[in-house]
Amino acid sequence: MSETYEGVVAVGGDLGTSTSKFCDGERIICFSSVVGDALTDQLEESWRRMNRSTDHRWIRNLALWDEPRSCWRYVGAMTRSSQRPLWYTEAGVVQSFEDAYLGLQAGLFLLGIERQRPLGRVALGFGVPIKAGEHASSQLLDYVRGRLQVDGDRKLMSIRAKNLATGEVREEKIEMVFSIVQFQAYGAYMALLFSRFQMKLYNTYVVDVGHGTWIRLPVVENEADITLADSEPNGLHAITRNISRAIFEKSGQKVKIPEQRIMERLAAGQREIEVPGAGVFNFQAMLDAECEALADEIMTRIRNDVGALGARGVSLDYFAIVGGGAHLLTERLRRRIREYFGWDEAMATERIVGVEALPVETRYVNAAGFMLLARDQIALELEREVDPTLAIGAVVTETLEHA
């Protein structure tokens, strides 16, 4: 049976709270984790005539045919035109299996677009939010399998996609050779296993600070500890929301600054923002206070979990701090963990790892790790050594500057 795995493309997918990321080992696809109802045919045609954007890429103008509803649905950036956008992983929970399935279709289709050829045959490793627990993860996997078309021994994902800017419609079928589902932060562990750990198994406590949530995931003897794994709805979004509220109050309630503008400042390393009619505000002190509070919250959970693991005779070898918010929290958490264990600087540097230990940018590490998980399974089936390398040459997002 091993010959059936020849030519299979390993793909990793991460259905994140804010964005969904997909990786085939050479590129990353990243789009907003949101779908929405399409405009009427008449309004859609009017939108196309009035659209002045020169960005006609599929990732920016994507609609997918929703078979159960027998209608087109907008995905990612195009949902800005939807009357009812629906985030399919809000608050650390998969809100709709149907919508999450569209997210999976979008990621696989867009990878094919960037590869300039459809994927054909896929082994998929993907991550879902922790909050709903293991039962919901297996339910999602069952839902995905139930949506596939059976053709003899093959199971096919049928995709019908439309580019709203050009009106082009494409249809393709992707054979899903197998699918593996895990909790989101497990992808980061897999990336470390293949790079930093050189395929040696170490008990690792992963902290994944994302946009909408932060996740804690102890991995013991290569298995996610589901009794302690959890996600908390207190990520970067909560920080920017609190800063926006504080600036609004300090400015005499003149203008409320959108949280997205503050997020953009953070990404650019800037700490000042202008409030029309009230002047320029430096929010560095507010940001520091918010980050210290979040670091305290995370450290409280770490202490509790270390105690629970110790009571079972389990010790941790590494702590890993990943996610889009890692650059704000890593040093704060490193200091707290070091003080808690009484480690010197050399020990802390060795055992508390962050972006410097990862083979890919931290916010994409879970998708890359799940690709490695799928690739590992293929190697096992073919009785070959697994290829641990990543060669990410492009990150494709909904904004042109990252394309």
Image: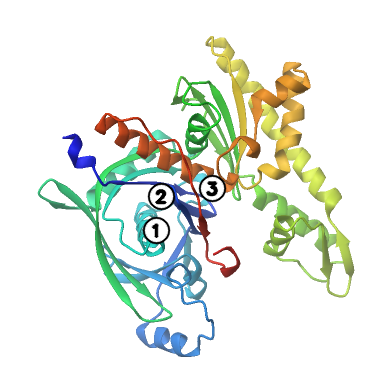
Nearer to us in this view, 108 or 259: 108
- Left/right of residue 111 with respect to residue 349 in the rendered view: left
Mark 2 vs 1, N-terminal side: 2
Residue 388 placement (x, y as % from top left): 44, 35
* Secondary structure type for disc 2: loop
User: Which residue is painted at 48% across and 40% down in the image?
Assistant: 184
Type of amino acid under label 2:
Asp
Q: Relative to 387, is 328 on the left or the right? A: right
Amino acid under label 3? Tyr
The CA span between labels 3 and 1 is 15 Å
Mark 2: few, some, or many residues within 10 Å (few <14, many ≥20)? many
Q: Position of residue 285 (x, y in %)?
A: 86, 49
Find disc 3 in the rendering and name its residue. Answer: 364
Tell me which numbered mark, 3 or 1, is placed earlier along the sequence: 1
Q: Amino acid at mark 1?
A: Leu
The residue closer to the viewer here, 119 or 279, is 119
Mark 2 and mark 1: span between their CA atoms? 8 Å
Quadrant in the picture for residue 171: bottom left
Who comes first in sequence, dot 2 or dot 3? 2
Tag of residue 24: 2
Q: Residue at x 49, y 29 (%)?
A: 193
Residue 1 vertical position relative to residue 142 in the rendered view, above or below: above
Asked if 71 appears above or below 333 in the picture, the reply is below
Mark 1 nearby-residue class (10 Å; few <14, some 14–19, many ≥20): many
Q: Residue 306 is drawn in which quadrant? A: top right
SS class, disc 3: helix
Residue 340, percent from left and from top: 74, 20
Residues tagged 2 and 1 counted as in contact (Cβ below 8 A): yes
* Alpha carbon separation for disc pair 2 and 3: 12 Å
Tag 2–tag 3 contact (CB < 8 Å)? no
Report which residue position mark 1 lands on.
111
